[in-house]
Image: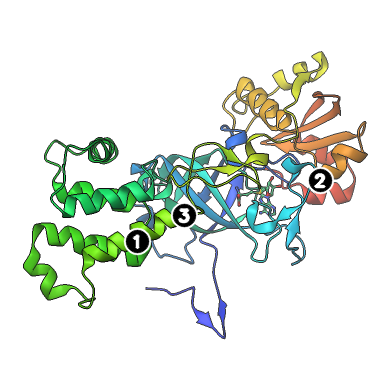
Amino acid sequence: MHFFSFFLTGQVLTQPIGYIESCFTGKNGTPRQPSICSLSRGCLRISKKIFNNPEHSLMGLQQFSHVWILFIFHKNGHLSWKAKVRPPRLNGEKTGVFSTRSPHRPNAIGLTLAKLDKVEGDTVYLSGIDMIQGTPVIDIKPYIAEYDSPRPTDSLKECLEGVTSQAEGGDVSSPVFQTKNSEHKKRSEQDDNTTFLDIDDNSVDKCDLSCKILDNVKVVLATANEPSFVEDTCSLPEFSSKRLVEEDIKNLKQSQDLPGHRNGSLSESQDKPDTCDSFVAKWVTESPVPRLTVRFTPHSQRELQQFKSSCEQGEPSFRFFQSVEEAKYAITKVLSADPRSVYRRNQCLDRLFYFSLDTIHITCWFGDGFAEVLKIQPVAEQAKTCGRLFTCRIAVPQV
Ligand SMILES: C[S@@+](CC[C@H](N)C(=O)[O-])C[C@H]1O[C@@H](n2cnc3c(N)ncnc32)[C@H](O)[C@@H]1O
């Protein structure tokens, strides 16, 4: 077995497991999050430097629909970061770097949730990516909703009260338990044999309790089922475990500022609710940056029609898109999210904007509330006609 990551004088050394082949050749025009364009495709071949048989490492992965990709923002140029950044969605306003997905961070690590289209041998095929060509990937993990998304449940207080009531031989048919039971069944797709202990274990899990509380709750659960077991194993003999839970509930009642979750968004000044649903900052869901209308000039439409999904008699062809319609959809999605930097948005209003997508080079401009595609060229052709500097920046995809 190889160990590529290890601690050495406080440093973690990592080795990419592979490099992304992406439909985005450069940062310009690459979506800021994978959700912007579901058709943005790429693939990742696991390196033979990591595993002698890279395909073995992908065994079982196709059983998952989505994967987390951890990668390095290798094109950030220089290692510099600031405590506060200006995310494009905040249109120039500052916020703490750790409250954003900025690529400029102390450790240039990106995290993308991509759709896993297929696994073939040593290669994973992805869609909905926001990584550029050649991005070094340091890990892949399956997306598991049960682990990776907060569970909408009752408040922490209710969970703990429910547990206490159960430990006291309380009413199993109480609304709190019924909700948890049905939620539990829905999530784990278990049958009607769900046991009393199962229900409570799940409710504890849902509430994301601290270790201390969790341990105490488990002890109470065990008390309800197997008193002698608790006597033997409880590591806190000086406390009654039930009393600990009661104290936790009392503390919770006193504390009104528990971090909780709620579906929706939250502004800085809003109080945080004590439920377990998720919430996000308001600037994410209600960004001051409007979505743009996207249009194509008749000329650019005709140019796009020249592309074919496969090489036919020297026609320009796509590498990742499967049709002109897909390409048009992706261009529209990228532009409607306004890919310009805040500086360009405010200072360079009437300037041309260029980006590459798959094998297409796109020239467009932005007006008040819209983006218009002016020209569509094959990347290779465009690179030929442009200056040397630009040619160097473009990695011509292998068709
Ligand atoms: C805002 S970041 C978000 C990335 C990831 N989803 C995350 O949350 O960590 C996405 C942007 O990073 C930039 N980017 C993508 N791959 C990069 C790379 N390899 N090096 C530097 N910047 C990159 C692109 O400009 C893209 O729009």
Spot occupied by residue 222 in the image (x, y as percentages of width and height): 15, 61
For the C terminus, which image quadrant? top right
Report how far apart the C-alphas of labels 2 and 1 lie in the structure: 43 Å
Can you identify the residue that label 3 sits on? 140
Give the mark, 3 or 2, whose residue is nearer the N terminus: 2
> Mark 3: which secondary structure?
strand
Instruction: Give how far apart the Cα atoms at labels 3 and 2 are.
Output: 33 Å
Contact between labelled residues 1 and 2, with CB atoms less than 8 Å apart: no
Residue at mark 3 to residue at mark 1: CA–CA distance? 38 Å
Q: Which residue is mark 1?
A: 248
Disc 1 C-beta below 8 A from ligand 1: no
Assign a secondary structure to mark 1: helix
* Mark 3: few/some/many CA within 10 Å (<14, 14-19, 20+): some
Q: Nearer the viewer, mark 3 or mark 1?
A: 1
Residue 333 vs residue 316, the one in the foreground: 333
Q: Is 265 in front, or is 24?
A: 265
Of labels 2 and 1, earlier in sequence is: 2
Residue 231 falls in image quadrant: bottom left
| Residue 216 x, y percent position in the rendering | 26, 65
Q: Nearer the viewer, mark 3 or mark 2?
A: 2
For label 2, the residue is: 92
Helix, strand or loop status at disc 2: loop
| Amino acid type shown at disc 3 | Ile
| Position of residue 144 measured from the top left corner of the image (x, y, whole percent) | 38, 46
Classify 122 as above or below 355. below
Q: Earlier in the sequence, mark 3 or mark 1?
A: 3
Q: Is residue 170 left or right of residue 383?
A: left
Nearest the eye: 19 or 147: 147
Can you say which quadrant of the picture contains the N terminus?
bottom left
- Above or below, 370 relative to 147: above
